Image: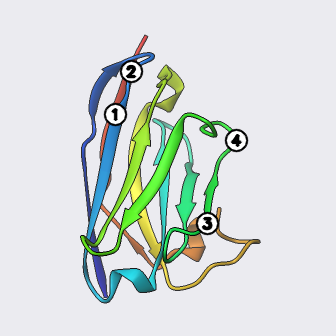
Amino acid sequence: QVQLVESGGGLVQAGGSLGLSCAASGRTFSGYVMGWFRQAPGKDRDFVATITWRGGNTYYADSVKGRFTISRDNAKNTVYLQMNSLKPEDTGVYYCAAAMGFSSSYYRTLSWYDYWGQGTQVTVSS
């Protein structure tokens, strides 16, 4: 069992930056692939970014590539999402998730992930 708690959300103007954190407790953090997803009002939850066990590989949604950076610190049991050049369309609830394994076919899908946090709200004003 893994417990995930996100923090760092808030209100920011378009073009600004915001950093999210997700603290994990429970089983060995380094044993999990970590991902970030987001859900805009009235829409499905969508993939944002994923990072593999030791941070050697990162993957991004096209919509955030070049603006967002996912990273992790296994010593602190924490995964981060640095968001720069924010746009109003980045608004939503951001969730972190943990998966036991990695699949190049499924890492973007919700069902691949075993554990989820409760989410943190990010609002980008125009």
Q: Residue at x 47, y 25 (%)?
A: 86
Crowding at label 1, few (<14), some or many (≥20) Cα neighbours within 10 Å? Answer: some
Asked where in the image residue 17 lies, by quadrant, the reply is top left
Which residue does the numbered mark 3 point to in the structure image?
Answer: 57
- The amino acid type, in three-letter code, at marker 1 is Leu
Residue 59, position as x, y percentages in the image: 64, 57
Cα distance in 3D space between marks 1 and 3: 22 Å
- Tell me whether circle 2 and circle 1 mark residues in contact (CB < 8 Å): yes
Q: Residues within 10 Å of mark 4 (few under 14, many from 20)?
A: few
Say which residue label 4 marks: 62
Residue that numbered label 2 is attached to:
16
In percent of width and height, residue 22 lies at 30, 60
Question: What's the mark number on residue 18?
Answer: 1
Q: Residue furthest top?
A: 126
Which amino acid does the dot numbered 4 rest on?
Answer: Asp
Q: Position of residue 32 (x, y in %)?
A: 45, 80
Q: CA distance from mark 4 to mark 2?
A: 19 Å
The 10 Å Cα crowd at callout 2, few under 14, some 14 to 19, many 20 or more, is some
Marks 3 and 4, how far apart at CA: 16 Å
Closer to us: 94 or 72? 72
